[in-house]
Image (tube, rainbow, N blue to C red):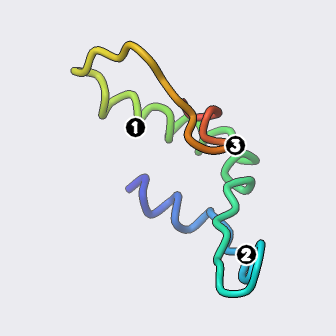
Amino acid sequence: MISEKIKNTVRDVLDFPKPGIVFKDITPILKEAALCKEIVSALADQLKDIKVDVVAGIESRGFLFG
């Protein structure tokens, strides 16, 4: 399942940017072209019956999948 692939690929960076925070690093996903394609396909499948007018990237890398 795609969610398991994502969980297994995302890297946890402990105490970044300050103690007590776990930063979820998605750069390992970006290194795997096949996984990126699979994520985009899964996202498109979820939205196939919805008319989309605007896409907003919420955070600094969200636009890559938007």
Categorize mark 2 by other alpha carbons within 10 Å: few (<14), some (14-19), many (20+). few
| Quadrant in the picture for the N terminus | bottom left
| Quadrant in the picture for the C terminus | top right
65 and 30: which one is in front? 65
Q: Quadrant of residue 17?
A: bottom right
* Amino acid tagged 1: Ala
The answer to which of marks 1 and 3 sits earlier in the sequence is 1
Categorize mark 1 by other alpha carbons within 10 Å: few (<14), some (14-19), many (20+). some
The answer to which of marks 2 and 3 sits earlier in the sequence is 2
Distance from the alpha carbon under mark 1 to that under mark 3 = 21 Å
Image position of 31 with respect to 49: above or below: below
Indicate left or right for 27 with 35 as reference. Answer: right
SS state under label 3 = loop
22 and 46: which one is in front? 22
Indicate left or right for 18 with 52 as reference. Answer: right
Q: Position of residue 31 (x, y in %)?
A: 76, 47
Badge nearest the viewer, 1 or 3: 3
* Amino acid tagged 2: Val
Q: Position of residue 52 (x, y in %)?
A: 35, 17
Residue contact at pointers 1 and 3, CB within 8 angstroms: no
Q: Which residue is mark 3?
A: 60
Q: Which residue is mark 1?
A: 42
Q: How many marks are shown on the rendered structure?
A: 3
Q: Which residue is mark 2?
A: 13
Distance from the alpha carbon under mark 2 to that under mark 3 = 17 Å
Q: Position of residue 7 (x, y in %)?
A: 52, 66
Image position of 22 with respect to 5: above or below: below
Q: What residue is rendered at 44% in x and 18% in y?
A: 54
Indicate left or right for 39 with 45 as reference. Answer: right
